[in-house]
Image (spheres, rainbow, N blue to C red):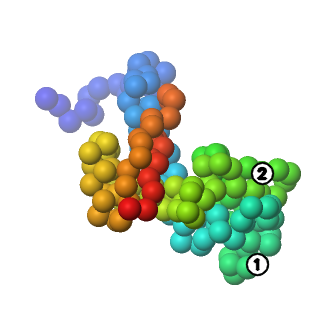
């Protein structure tokens, strides 16, 4: 073993690319970003504030007292997660995934319940968490690849 000082520097162009490792890292980073965006949306009641109509990013920022550009970035991140739709530049509405699901229970609230901790959960884990939160698990549906998320359908117990 040497200290590497007697070796020629290796060019990055010569190194093979491990696309699987890069993909795994990207999924971790993007998953964390999605969780943060969803968490901010729930904390700021974004889905309730938008309601059944549309709302501009500027109007939401004004009502929240947040920076308009930061609010726009959050709303576009939520649109990228398909929880909102940008109907025209800076104007957003909720999608079916972001709308109330029977009885006013938001899917995103349930997502936050089970997503804390960032570990993968089984259908049994979801059922236990739902029961602890006063819900009955109806279904767990994986989204098509390359998505790593699942849609959890639950209703009040």
Please give the count of numbered marks on the rendered protein: 2
- Farthest residue to the right: give it: 88
Residue 52 screen position, x and y as percent: 74, 61
Instruction: Find the distance from the CA under tag 2 to the CA under tag 1.
Output: 18 Å
Residue reaching furthest to the left: 1
Query: Which corner quadrant holds the C terminus?
Result: bottom left
Query: For numbered disc 2, what is the local secondary structure?
Result: strand
In the foreground, 66 or 52:
52
User: Residue 99, image x and y in percent?
Assistant: 63, 56
Q: Residue at x 33, y 50 (%)?
A: 126
Query: Label for residue 102?
Result: none
Choose the circle earlier in sequence order: 2 or 1. 1
Q: Where residue 53 sits: x, y (%)?
A: 79, 61
Image height check: is 81 above or below 134? above
Could you say which quadrant of the image residue 17 lies in? top left
Q: Residue at x 64, y 60 (%)?
A: 74
Label 1 element class? helix
Question: Taking the image as drawn, is residue 37 in sight?
Answer: no
Residue 83 image position (x, y, % from top left): 63, 51
Along the line of sight, which residue is nearer the eye, 11 or 61?
A: 61
Q: Toward which corner of the image does residue 102 lie, by quadrant?
A: bottom right
Q: Check contact, mark 2 vs mark 1: CB within 8 A.
A: no
- Residue 62: give its label: 1
Residue at (50%, 28%) from the top-left corner?
145
User: Which circle marks residue 86 in the picture?
Assistant: 2
């Amino acid at each position: 073993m040497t200290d590497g000082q007697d070796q020629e520097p290796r060019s990055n162009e010569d190194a093979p690319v491990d696309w699987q490792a890069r993909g795994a890292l990207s999924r971790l980073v993007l998953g964390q970003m999605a969780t943060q965006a969803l968490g901010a949306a729930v904390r700021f009641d974004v889905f309730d504030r938008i309601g059944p109509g549309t709302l501009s990013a500027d109007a939401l920022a004004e009502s929240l007292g947040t920076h308009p550009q930061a609010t726009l970035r959050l709303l576009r991140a939520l649109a990228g997660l398909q929880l909102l739709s940008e109907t025209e530049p800076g104007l957003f509405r909720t999608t079916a995934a972001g709308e109330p699901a029977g009885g006013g229970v938001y899917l995103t609230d349930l997502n936050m319940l089970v997503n804390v901790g960032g570990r993968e959960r089984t259908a049994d884990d979801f059922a236990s968490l739902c029961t602890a939160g006063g819900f009955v698990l109806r279904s767990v549906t994986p989204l098509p690849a390359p998505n790593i998320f699942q849609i959890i359908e639950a209703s009040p117990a």
